[in-house]
């Protein structure tokens, strides 16, 4: 199991029970994990990203602390904010205007052992009707496009005009 900010707390503790004390030290409200009922309910819902938020700690710092404890290599800080968003071109659909509500760096997620489709699906649940999500990949994301088509979502895909080998996928 690769530990990431999207890892569910219960899955982590089932795989690495020794991390329980470390999580409680980082986020004291999670001392209730010692209660088996609360452990199952909270643990199934809470991700490490949420644990970090409750513990007032950077999610990457928490993940890397836990990864070091079990011998996994550290992850680099999230680079989503470093994605350059090119200006809208004449070929882009009208619904692509303004800034995306969410940006998903699929290249970085894959490096961290995560699946971009899973992250996109999580974010689509809270996407505003008049906004869009931007996915950056270094391959043509055919499975993503197929999944969006099955959900009757609009998706537009194109090569990044400024960065060879990168692709932009806009979803709403």
Image (spheres, rainbow, N blue to C red):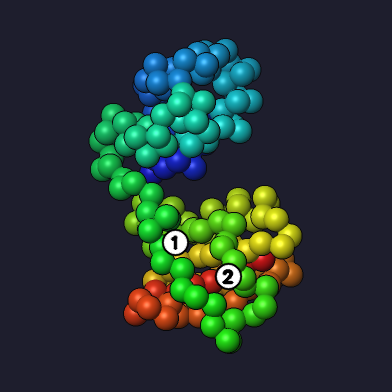
Q: x and y percent of residue 9 in the render?
A: 50, 31
Judged left or right of residue 49, residue 129 is right
Mark 2: which secondary structure? strand
Judge whether residue 14 can be spotted in this image. no
Vertical side of 162 occupied by 76: above or below: above
Please report the residue visible at 58 percent of the width from the left and 16 percent of the height from the top.
Answer: 36
**Looking at the image, residue 112 lies above or below residue 94:** above
Please say if the residues under marks 2 and 1 sit with CB atoms less than 8 Å apart: no
Q: Which residue is mark 2?
A: 170
Q: CA distance from mark 2 to mark 1?
A: 13 Å
Tally of numbered tags: 2
The residue at 50%/80% (across/down) is 158
**Residue found at x 62% / y 72%:** 96
Q: Position of residue 104 (x, y in %)?
A: 49, 58
- Mark 1 falls on what kind of element? helix
Residue behind mark 1: 106
Is residue 144 left or right of 73 when viewed as pictured? right
Q: Quadrant of the N terminus?
A: top left
In the rendered structure, the answer to whether residue 167 lies left or right of residue 101 reads left
Q: Nearer the viewer, residue 15 or 143?
A: 143
């Amino acid at each position: 199991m690769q530990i990431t900010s999207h890892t569910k707390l219960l899955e982590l503790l089932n795989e690495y029970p020794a991390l329980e004390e470390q999580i409680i030290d980082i986020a004291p409200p999670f001392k209730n994990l010692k209660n088996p009922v609360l452990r199952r309910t909270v643990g199934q819902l809470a991700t490490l990203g949420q644990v970090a938020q409750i513990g007032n700690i950077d999610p990457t710092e928490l993940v890397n602390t836990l990864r070091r404890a079990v011998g996994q290599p550290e992850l680099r800080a999230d680079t989503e904010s470093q994605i350059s968003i090119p200006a809208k071109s004449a070929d882009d659909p009208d619904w692509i205007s303004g800034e995306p509500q969410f940006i998903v760096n699929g290249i970085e997620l894959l490096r961290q052992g995560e699946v971009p489709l899973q992250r996109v699906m999580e974010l689509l649940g809270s996407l505003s009707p008049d906004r869009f999500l931007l996915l950056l990949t270094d391959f043509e994301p055919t499975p993503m496009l197929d999944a969006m088509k099955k959900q009757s979502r609009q998706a537009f895909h194109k090569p990044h005009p400024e960065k060879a080998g990168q692709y932009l996928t806009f979803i709403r």
